[in-house]
Image (cartoon, rainbow, N blue to C red):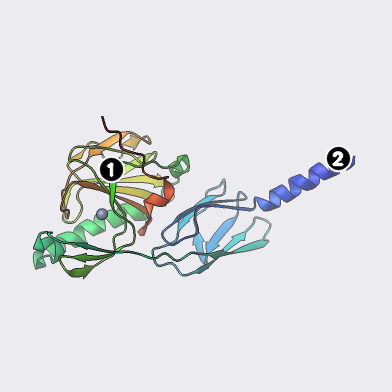
Amino acid sequence: MIRLLLLVAVLFVGAQASALELKGAFTQGTLITGKVAPGSSVLLDGVPLLALPDGSFVFGLPRDAKSNALLSVRRKDGSVAQRKLKIRKRNYRIQRIDGLPKRKVTPKKRDYKRIAREQKLLNAVRHRVTQIVDFKNGFVWPARGRISGVYGSQRILNGKPRAPHLGVDIAAPSGAPIIAASDGVVSLTHEGMFFTGKTIQIDHGLGVGTIYIHLSKVLVKEGQRVRKGELIGRVGKTGRATGPHLHWGLTWKTMRLDPSLLVGPMPKVQKK
Ligand SMILES: [Zn+2]
């Protein structure tokens, strides 16, 4: 009897503890995945997050996230649990890149129309929140090579201060394979954007997406379902790039996050 009571107590505590599960590093630029009891609603700093019927939800901590955030969970019975999140600040590097075509650093007047149109296309697919949870299958590096640019760095291009770098650059030879970082659905392909060149965006569900840019070849179509590890394109230097590399980005809606936090260290490139 006592043993049975004990078991019930453990189960009860277990259920309480799992009222809110969070996964991810609490640093600026991180994607956090979470789970609450089915039917609960979740708010981050007072803003509602979409939670699926099974209780899954996600949110991002932007590059310059403040050091505190408050997560509130309202359960079906009306009770509210709150968790204060401490977010670690990061020190971002300064990266100087020279030798870029002048027009790619200071676009001409007529380029701005095109840039705005292309940004609108990207934002439109990023705002689309689909109820798939492919991101739960985890992520892998989409290409192998030397990391030539990290997330968050302040950029000085041809001597001019420009927007921070919100992705990871992997230097690889032109034509090297690019694979899907996780399961998902191709939400956008483009044969030549002003800054990003040949571009692929993949939707992994609940507003989580990854982007692959500067490609020499796009090998997938919009609407196509892809599996983690599947070949989707080839490395190139289209758009604003000085040499062949893959720029890999992670987005939660239009918030740009650090994809390297989702994967381990880059595997060593095998030399034959
Ligand atoms: Zn880049």
Percent of width and height locating residue 42: 55, 59
For disc 2, does the CB lie below 8 Å from ligand 1?
Answer: no
Q: Residue at x 38, y 36 (%)?
A: 228
| CA–CA distance in space, label 1 to label 2 | 56 Å
Residue flagged by tag 1: what amino acid is it?
Gly
Percent of width and height locating residue 32: 48, 54
Query: Residue 8 lies in what quarter of the image?
Result: top right
- Residue that mark 2 sits on: 3
Res. 173 mark: none
Query: Residue 7 lies in what quarter of the image?
Result: top right
Placement of 246 over or under 87, stated as above or below: above
Q: Earlier in the sequence, mark 1 or mark 2?
A: 2
Percent of width and height locating residue 91: 39, 65
Residue at the far front in the pictured view:
272
100, 214: nearer the viewer:
100
**Callout 1 touching callout 2 (CB < 8 Å):** no
Placement of 144 over or under 52, stated as above or below: above
Q: How many numbered marks does the figure carry?
A: 2
Placement of 11 over or under 72, stated as above or below: above
User: Residue 151 vs residue 103: left or right?
Assistant: right
For ligand 1, give the image quadrant: bottom left
14, 131: nearer the viewer:
14
Residue flagged by tag 2: what amino acid is it?
Arg
- Residue that mark 1 sits on: 145
Q: Residue at x 41, y 63 (%)?
A: 62
Residue at the far right in the pictured view:
1
Percent of width and height locating residue 106: 13, 67
Identify the secondary structure beneath mark 1: loop
Identify the secondary structure beneath mark 2: helix
